[in-house]
Image: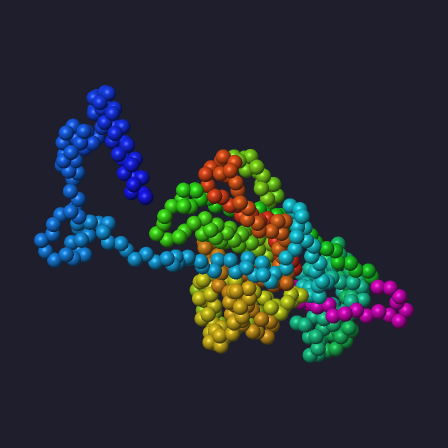
Amino acid sequence: MKAKTIFKYTFGLLLLIMGAIAIEPSVMNFLPDWLGAIFNGDPLAILSTVAPTAAGQAIAETVTVTEGKAASDTLYRPKISNIITKIRPDLFPMDTIMREVGMVGDCPSETYKFYSSNVRGVTDTMTVEHTQSDVKSAVITITNSHIWLADDIGVCPEITVDSEEFRFKVMAVDTTNLTITILAINGTASGGSGTGAFVPALANATKITRIGNAKGELDAQNTPYANFLTDTENYVQVFMCQVEESLTNAIHLKEVEWNINDFKQDAILDMRRMAELTMLFGYPKLDLLDTLAQKKVNLMGGARHFITGEITYGHSAAGTNATFNSWANTIFSGNNGSDRRYLFGGNNFMEWLMNIPFIEKRMAANESEVIAGIKFRVIDTIFGELYIRRHQGFSDVEGFSYNALVLDMNNVERRFQSATETKKLNLDETGVRRVKAFRIREAWTMAFRNEETHRWITDTD
């Protein structure tokens, strides 16, 4: 049926051309040479106007692939795999953890303010030396006068009197001049020797610890104490990406299937990667004005800005068990964090860490845990558990491959103003462009609470 139709229309076209030539012979000047030759009485002339192809040449020898390719470079087709290898390194473990198991809430505002309250401290340090002068009470200058109240009891672990640590009772507190008046409990005898009631010599930088208080039988009140909250702000940042594919490209034959769904997946992965780096290295800024685009944007602060606690080391020196034990002590002790912390480190840091003998043994034990699809190596210490994961983002940022970040996820929070949404844009229907288009958008911010529970590990070499 199709052949008949083609023949009918071809024959009609020839009749139309012949009629035009009969009416106006000059029409011949506008016809192609081979078509003009047919109507000029030389139908075989068409053969002389078509150049022979290489494939039409005779080969007077055994036909091989080499000879065939030389004769026709389109004759042989490659075998095309329909499997596309997608390079997807693990670029956003923190983002994944926060989406799956982290503390998540809403934030119907562009600013998220969160409050922290530190517990009343117990340790202090002297800043001025006290010379022994046979006095039962003395005024000493310290660093943290706000942690002391009258009737508190203190101990100086570094100062001994007859093999016992020196203890004292606080008689008065002067927060303006950073001093406390102390009364010796187990003091020295005259001249600082033996046991007596006098305050011993106390060197500058002597450590003291608050261990309780002691009230009298008739005391009905205590000096009031209130620990005020401190507030911190972070701002909601809008993350967005858009993908487009022309309608022609969508229907065009391809050697492998690669379309807007793949573009959309790649765009989402890139958006999450950028969000991950913002969580690490972002700087908070409200209403930053882009003078070129004449628009304001909000920027979210990341861990590098909010977390100031730091452990330093030099990668040029080999790590030891003592090094790692000291780290564990610093990470878990002296704060009210959880017994589980997450350590994310750069590639070079991980290589350095794995050469510590204790870590080598733990790696051989192959203890691990998969959380939200991400595999963590678990290192159990006396102080707590460390969940360790290599983080490519540290190596992507110059100078951070030997660094690491320790987080207490119980004190990390994500607040969404708008969750991830994918919206189809009707650009073709509205006459903008003949494309398929999708926009992916989300808006959120972070809160790093209880700063003492987090730590940077920073290389100083």
Which residue is at 82% across, 60% downward?
A: 224
The percent coordinates of residue 163 (x first, y second) are 69, 79
Q: How many numbered circles are shown?
A: 0
- The residue stretch that appears in magenta: 201-222
In-front residue for pair 47/129: 47
In-front residue for pair 39/106: 39
Is residue 203 within the magenta segment?
yes
Q: Quarter of the image containing the N terminus?
A: top left
In-front residue for pair 246/457: 246
The percent coordinates of residue 381 (x first, y second) are 57, 74
Q: Is residue 141 visible?
A: no
Q: Is residue 182 visible?
A: yes
Name the side, left or right, on which 340 lies relative to 37.
Answer: right
The prevailing secondary structure element of the residues shown in magenta is: loop
Which residue is at 66% across, 50% downward?
A: 107
Q: Is residue 426 above or below residue 26?
A: below
Determine the image quadrant of residue 197: bottom right
Which residue is at 70% across, 60% downward?
A: 118
In-front residue for pair 149/98: 98
Name the side, left or right, on which 374 lies relative to 40.
Answer: right
Name the side, left or right, on which 208 lies relative to 379.
Answer: right
